[in-house]
Image: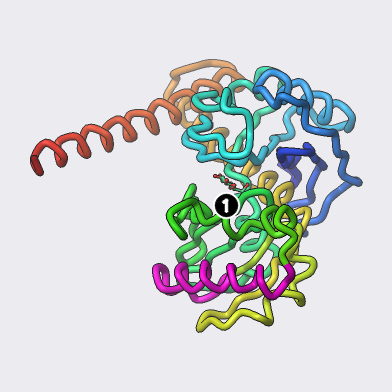
Amino acid sequence: MSKKAFGIDIGGSGIKGAPVDLATGELLAERVRIATPQPSTPDAVADTVAELIASFDIDDDMPVGVTFPAVIQAGVAQTAANVDKSWIGTDVDALLTKRTGHDVFVVNDADAAGIAEMTFGAGQDTSGVVLVVTLGTGVGSATFVDGRLVPNTELGHLLLHGDSAEKYMASSIREKEDLDWETWAGRLQEYFSHVEFLFSPTRIIVGGGVSKKHQKFLPLLDLKTEIVPAELRNEAGIVGAAALARHEQKSLKKAAKKAKKAGKTSDGKSDEKSAKKAAKKAAEKSEQQAGEKEKVKREAAK
Ligand code: BGC
């Protein structure tokens, strides 16, 4: 299997994608951007994703990684901050796999950017707790412990002044309120001091489009933690999603092979599908169990 995969970044205003060389983290072709349909319902976005992939000449079995600005568990969107609410409860993997014919794996957008930074950018060779914080329309976070992702940490929704921090210090808020760099940096200082106190990270990596202008605000921050700009910038989501997709497809193929050996199914394609289904079922079961445990704990505390 060649070290290639396709990455797609779904954002509020644009859907961007390109094939990625996973040996280097570089795009294999110029990325294509299509405006996000409005309203950005699952059906409309799925059509755009299919159109985007079709504009490239890629192998049918190339895995596709897709970023999405939501909590993602076992391929299902659990939240929808800054996108159409009809995404909540949608099995994004299943929808896009069906619509595109490729194996599609969805991942939280900040987690994807984090994977890219850890593999090819400012997080390489780090250990301990590393936080990647993306400043954009919303604020995303990816948390790594000794290089391993703790998914869906959603640190943009930490409470600050009684509301989600992102409503106070996202890059979009700086633009909307026309804040100068010093004023915005003051807000970032409050946020990052809080995050630093909670997590004692070894490094904070700041991503999102505004990280191109890091000289305007990072030097104004006074933290104990080393805070650095992301290195992949705009392409981080595409690269991280592609890396994740290849990794997931490989695991599925392995699981399918194992199942085939055990004589469970006969053709490779349906093996993969059943492996994906089985993995999803297992994740759902463990979520359900976690929910049950919580319930028991709450009952016990009464
Ligand atoms: C969402 C996150 C997302 C971030 C950046 C937040 O509002 O809750 O899931 O990672 O925005 O897009």
Up-down: is 270 above or below 152? above
Residue 272 seen in this snapshot: no
- Badge 1: how crowded within 10 Å, few (<14), some, or many (20+)? some
Q: Nearer the viewer, residue 168 or 279?
A: 168
Question: Magenta segment, principal secondary structure?
Answer: helix
- Tell me the quadrant of the picture where the C terminus can be found: top left
Residue 181 is one of the magenta-drawn residues: yes
Q: Residue at x 56, y 73 (%)?
A: 189
Q: Residue at x 65, y 29 (%)?
A: 103
Q: Nearer the viewer, residue 221 or 247?
A: 221
Up-down: is 118 above or below 97? below
* Label 1 lies in ligand 1 vicinity (Cβ under 8 Å): no
Q: Nearer the viewer, residue 37 or 24?
A: 37
Mark 1: which secondary structure?
Answer: helix
Q: How is the image coloured?
A: rainbow
Q: Residue at x 62, y 28 (%)?
A: 84
Check disc 1 and report the residue beneath it: 167
- x, y percent for residue 218: 68, 76
- x, y percent for residue 65: 67, 39
Magenta segment boundaries in residue numbering: 180-204
- x, y percent for residue 243: 66, 48
- Tell me the quadrant of the picture where the N terminus can be found: top right
**Amino acid on which the number 1 mark rests in the picture:** Lys
Residue 241 seen in this snapshot: yes
Up-down: is 94 above or below 230? above
- x, y percent for residue 86: 57, 23
Say which quarter of the image contains residue 236.
Answer: bottom right
Residue 299 is one of the magenta-drawn residues: no
Horizontal side of residue 301 vs 170, given as left or right: left
Q: Residue at x 90, y 46 (%)?
A: 29
Horizontal side of residue 16 vs 108, given as left or right: right
The mark tally for this picture is 1
